[in-house]
Amino acid sequence: MQLKQQLIEIRRRIHQHPELGFEEFETAKLIEETLRKYGIETKRLAKTGVVGLLRGNGERTIALRADMDALPIQELNQVEYASKIPGKMHACGHDVHVTCLLGAAIVLSNRRNALRGNVKFIFQPAEEAPGGAKPMIEEGVLEDPKVDVIVGGHCWPGLPAGCIEVGEGPVMAAPDVLTLKIIGKGGHGAMPHTTVDAIAVAFQVGVALQQVVSRMSDPLDPVVLTIGSISGGTAPNVIAQEVLMKGSIRSLSPETHEKLPRIIEQVVKGVTSAYGATYEMDYYNLYPPTINDPKVAQMVLKAAEKALGPGKALWSRYPSMGGEDFSYFTQKIPGAFFRIGVSDPSKQRPSYPLHSPNFDVCEDAIPAAVSVLVQIVEDYLNQ
């Protein structure tokens, strides 16, 4: 009970002082101070990332990962621990992730003599963008000592606090970013025949791109294509010269992820040429799909069953089309990413989605997730 209250206080402190990607200096300082207090070695990587190392009595090493960054969102919650920083908020639960990992570090530090191996606690910056996992890997987070397996978790609205959910294979999508400029020939709104209307062409491109999902992709291999922003034109009687379109493309399989840019450009090229327009396209691969190793996923499930009791550890058969740069870790070593239930089990408090200005968690989720992380480490190192 004492540890639970200590962790809630840590979570609320982080929640009140959110920091965006690669700006998590105060969060990193809090993490370092807490880890050192419990005799855990610390090191900085990727500017604001923190790595804690707990040395046990063995050669194997397991890593636990939490992301640290907040979002540029104005919080609307009327709670005493609401964000004190205008326009910034922990709307994706990364404050909870950090707190749970610190909780696991505190518990395991008191059991280090019984651990037949090492534990790395990876506190990663900038998951929301531009991504902190890759630079941490490049700076050696998985080395010295070499990490054999990695586990991470994410808050999940709709799943009751005290429960976790895990699956195998693709569990989160690759979230790519499309920027597309349609270039026409501007002119007078009363003389469209002397122009190439970039807005009209952009409409056609937007409709045609949905065929990539409905007619050019395997329906059993999900793809989401969203055009979230269109801007162009200056006046009601002027035909636009250019239109800028921005969108998000999400896919689960590495094969589909690789071929989507070619298919999308094929469609854009065909539509624009048919109407006498041209285009400029930038397709940015943000993160690859997150793919859980089956053995590690089963290990997480069994550990959660021990830690939480019957009916609290769930096996998921449905991936999310959300993206996560935890995927870079699972490209390098076996790993698993699981869902942490954060909704009020009594349903007296409403559950808001991730990235909502009203997002909040039932804090009973924190000790539950800590117990799962501790059990995972002990099962892996002492099996």
Image (tube, rainbow, N blue to C red):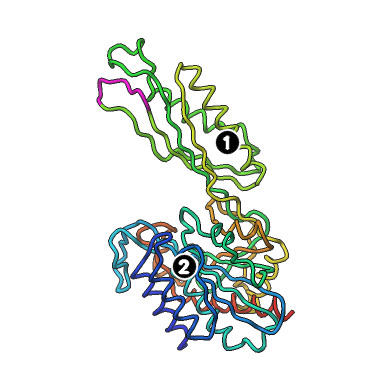
Front residue of 338/335: it is 335
Q: Earlier in the sequence, mark 2 or mark 1?
A: 1
Disc 2/disc 1 C-alpha distance (Å): 37 Å
Q: Position of residue 264 (x, y in %)?
A: 55, 32
Q: Which residue is mark 2?
A: 343
Disc marking residue 19: none
For image coordinates 30% across by 11% down, the residue present is 191
291 w.r.t. 12: above or below: above
Q: What's the amino acid at mark 1?
A: Pro
The stretch of residues the image draws in magenta is 235-242
Does the magenta run of residues contain 190?
no
For image coordinates 48% across by 29% down, the residue present is 207
Q: What's the amino acid at mark 2?
A: Ser
For image coordinates 33% across by 19% down, the residue present is 186
Element carrying mark 1:
helix
335 w.r.t. 104: above or below: above
Disc marking residue 261: 1
Count of numbered circles on the image = 2
The 10 Å Cα crowd at callout 1, few under 14, some 14 to 19, many 20 or more, is some
Q: Position of residue 33 (x, y in %)?
A: 44, 80
> Quadrant location of residue 258?
top right
Is 229 situated left or right of 379 in this image?
left
2 or 1: mark nearer the eye: 1
Give the quarter of the figure containing the C terminus: bottom right
